[in-house]
């Protein structure tokens, strides 16, 4: 059954935890969808994990559309959440609606995510009025890396915590259907989760949220440029891949790959004819 925003609302009401993972390609989408992950987030984190940028700022709408479309083709049941890249919604309400629409029309997304609290409420409201579900994202918002002066845990002082609670209320009022809480203390995430009626999805925000999200290369040990404290490595796929790449090299160099079973046959008559021609 396809996950919808109604499914997610019900899951919060029934205290049924929501799973979200980042996903950027067709094959991975098929695997995640098959095990029932409810939300595939085509995060602008692809700037780091897929494109090798230092942060998410260079990611374009074109990058996001191509990857979101690939994920949509691979997933039947998961809700596809397209992440609005830097400067695709900050510039104006018009740009926000237009670019959110592109995720739906060109990439098959079911909802979009954007970073920010109260200050992006006009954008959230306008996108929702265009019948596009919106997931908000507050706390450590990576597109604000320069304004924050680095990737720092947010909401630690009374004032900062109050602002985040207020941000969560405001995005709900503006019509957001869920909110990602990133890099905030677990106790504060619990308070926010109890305060709003929309689902909260935590990343570095403790177990008290309505759901969790991780960057899939982080949880599979495939991205080691930096590993945040909140990441749990569920498998070391990076090591498995490295071993397979090394084995492949070794077999090609030794001439043991490809073996006969990996090879196409041709009849002896054809080879004989070719040999005669060559020797004539
Ligand atoms: O881009 C992304 O992957 C995200 C998650 C970290 C929530 O925004």
Image: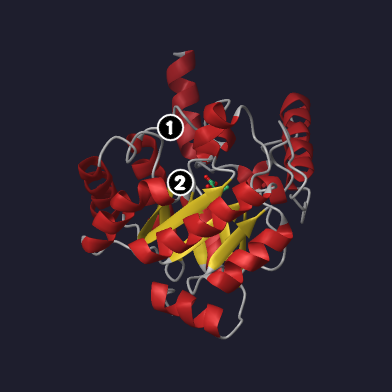
Of 213 and 50, the residue lying toward us: 213
Q: Crowdedness of circle 1 by 10 Å Cα count: few (<14), some, many (20+)?
A: many
Where does the image place residue 10, in percent across and percent down from the top left?
Answer: 48, 82
Where does the image place residue 243, in percent across and percent down from the top left?
Answer: 79, 38
Position of residue 255 in the picture relative to residue 107 (left or right): right
- The quarter of the image holding the C terminus is top left
Residue behind mark 2: 115
Instruction: Single out the residue that lies furthest toward the top.
Output: 280
Mark 1 CB in 8 Å range of ligand 1? no
Q: Can residue 123 be seen by looking at this rendering? A: yes
Q: Can residue 83 be seen by looking at this rendering? A: no
Q: How is the image coloured?
A: secondary structure
The residue at 35%/52% (across/down) is: 121
Mark 1 secondary-structure assignment = loop
The residue at 68%/43% (across/down) is: 153
Of 177 and 247, the residue lying toward us: 177
Q: Total of numbered circles in the picture?
A: 2
The residue at 44%/27% (across/down) is: 58
Q: Which badge, 1 or 2, comes first in the chain's sequence?
A: 1
Q: CA distance from mark 1 to mark 2?
A: 14 Å
Residue 109 vertical position relative to residue 84 in the rendered view, above or below: below
The residue at 46%/52% (across/down) is: 26
Instruction: Single out the residue that lies furthest toward the front.
Output: 159
Where does the image place residue 253, in percent across and percent down from the top left?
Answer: 75, 24
Residue behind mark 1: 59
Of 1 and 104, the residue lying toward us: 104
Where does the image place residue 60, in percent across and percent down from the top left?
Answer: 37, 33
Mark 2 secondary-structure assignment = strand
Mark 2 CB in 8 Å range of ligand 1? yes
- The quarter of the image holding the N terminus is bottom left
């Amino acid at each position: 059954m396809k996950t919808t925003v109604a499914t997610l609302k019900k899951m919060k009401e029934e205290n049924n935890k929501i799973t979200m993972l980042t996903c950027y390609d067709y094959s991975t989408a098929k695997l995640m969808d098959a095990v029932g992950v409810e939300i595939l987030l085509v995060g602008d984190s692809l700037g780091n994990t897929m494109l090798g940028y230092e942060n998410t700022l260079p990611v374009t709408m074109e990058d996001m559309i191509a990857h979101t479309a690939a994920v949509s083709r691979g997933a039947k049941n998961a809700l596809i959440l397209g992440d609005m890249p830097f400067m695709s919604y900050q510039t104006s309400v018009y740009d926000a609606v237009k670019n959110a629409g592109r995720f739906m029309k060109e990439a098959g997304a079911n909802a979009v995510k954007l970073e920010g609290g109260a200050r992006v409420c006009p954008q959230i409201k306008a996108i929702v009025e265009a019948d596009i579900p919106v997931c908000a994202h507050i706390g450590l918002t990576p597109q604000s890396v320069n304004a924050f002066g680095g990737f720092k845990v947010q909401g630690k002082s009374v004032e900062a915590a109050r602002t985040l609670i207020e941000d969560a209320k405001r995005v709900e009022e503006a019509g957001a259907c869920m909110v990602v809480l990133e890099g905030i203390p677990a106790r504060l995430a619990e308070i926010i989760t109890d305060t709003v009626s929309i689902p909260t999805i935590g990343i570095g925000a403790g177990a008290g949220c309505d759901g969790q999200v991780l960057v899939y290369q982080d949880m599979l040990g495939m991205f080691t440029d930096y590993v945040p404290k909140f990441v749990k490595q569920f498998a070391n796929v990076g090591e498995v891949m490295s071993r397979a790449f090394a084995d492949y090299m070794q077999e090609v160099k030794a001439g043991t790959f490809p073996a006969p079973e990996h090879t196409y046959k041709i009849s002896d008559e054809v080879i004989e004819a070719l040999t005669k021609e060559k020797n004539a």
